Amino acid sequence: MVEHPLDVGRVRGSNPLSRTMRILAIETSCDETAISIIEAKGAKSKAQFKILANNVATQINIHQPYGGVVPMLAKREHIKNLPILLEKTLKEAKLKINDIDKMAVTIGPGLEPALWTGIVFAEEIAKTNKIPLVPVNHMEGHIFSILVPEKKKTFKTLDVKFPALALLVSGGHTEIILIKDWLKYEKIGQTRDDAAGEAFDKVARLLGLPYPGGPEISKLASEMRHDPSHITLPRPMLRTPDFDFSFSGLKTAVLYMVQKIEILTLDIKKQIAREFEDAVIDVLAFKTFKAVKKYKIKTLIVAGGVAANRRLKEVFEIEAKKEKIKLLFPTRELATDNSLMIALAAYFQKNKKRASSQKLKAQGNLEL
Ligand code: KG4
Ligand code: ZN
């Protein structure tokens, strides 16, 4: 009998008849060490999920004095956190490692020293306990983060109508992905220099705000949202005929502006924050909805750390309504890095056979 690829899995643990699969996922691509366990069953269009445990150990305090993530410090912290987090996660899920049917680990894109820690740790556990281990693309994980509803432990696959489009906006990436069906991706646009999140972080630093800059800028901008602003910044590449972005010029424009200002008062910082946030959102929205029209998109997904930005969501909600398309954002908590999204992506992935001798490799620039 040929089974659906998603139904094939080792049936271990205490529930062999229901074909429920327990997936343990590990994510260490940047500065969050994350481990979670989900229970999943059913084919992709009707899959059902239950979150058994979901843990993130953030390293923000470690990297904050440096104004950004230091890869070697991230590596050291992941190595320290992983065994503690695994124990905590299994305990919360009330499971033993032998109850796990499948493991998943992020192999890229991300910081290679950080990625390696998760891979080495996952391979060791998988090998010792004879659990199949699947590699997951971090950006694919972000796409699947939209499946998880607010404050719910059980949920089903959403009704995603294709063609769908994903705007992925994080600290390392800004790209527009055309999704013709589950797992069928085509990149149609991307940033030519800095990622949107990176621009938020760099501008925050210019304004003397702590890392990560996105939430800081967003907070200041919201305090100035309804006041008149005397500051204008460019909307880079707004009118180019492609779906690409560029954010480094925007950061440089802020740099020149800040250099000319004698005293950077809180009021001026708020004005700059708001104009900068508006500039980034204007180009993201314009290019994304241009693609929505061109490709006759039915579902729009916005994911990655910058998807936690409230103003971005407001603007996209208005535009999506005009276009009469379904808009999916992750919850704010799952917009930034986590391992729940890695577990979900692993469930949707086709089971590719991998020789046990074939080692996984960290791929800093892995593409979708
Ligand atoms: O996806 P993510 O957690 O990590 C990467 O994969 O890069 O994204 C982190 C990025 C950071 O650049 C951070 O400043 C940005 O997401 N970010 C935000 C907000 N929250 C996080 N950017 C704008 N507004 C926010 N509220
Ligand atoms: Zn990410």
Image (tube, helix red, strand yellow):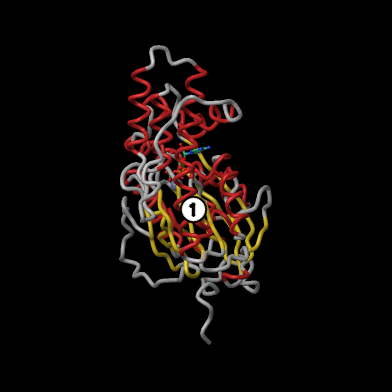
Q: Nearer the viewer, residue 172 or 41?
A: 172
Rendered location of residue 237, percent (x, y): 36, 46
How many discs mark residues in the rendered view?
A: 1
Element assignment for label 1: helix
Disc 1 marks a residue whose amino acid type is: His
Residue annotated with mark 1: 142
Q: Quadrant of residue 243?
A: bottom left
Q: Is mark 1 within 8 Å of ligand 2?
A: yes
Position of 349 relative to 138 (above/below): below
The residue located at (48%, 29%) in the rendering is: 273
The residue located at (51%, 29%) in the rendering is: 216
Please, which residue is most extreme toward the bottom here?
A: 1
Mark 1 Cα shell of 10 Å, populated few (<14), some (14-19), many (≥20) = many
On the rendered structure, is 226 left or right of 179?
A: right
Q: Nearer the viewer, residue 252 or 152?
A: 252
Rendered location of residue 146, percent (x, y): 57, 54
Locate the C terminus by quadrant. bottom left
The residue located at (52%, 45%) in the rendering is: 307
Rendered location of residue 83, percent (x, y): 46, 44
Q: Nearer the viewer, residue 320 or 23?
A: 320
On the rendered structure, is 283 left or right of 330?
A: left
Rendered location of residue 78, percent (x, y): 41, 40
Q: Nearer the viewer, residue 88 or 178?
A: 178
Q: Quadrant of residue 280?
A: top left
Position of 59 relative to 207 (above/below): below
Please, which residue is most extreme toward the top here?
A: 263
The residue located at (43%, 54%) in the rendering is: 139
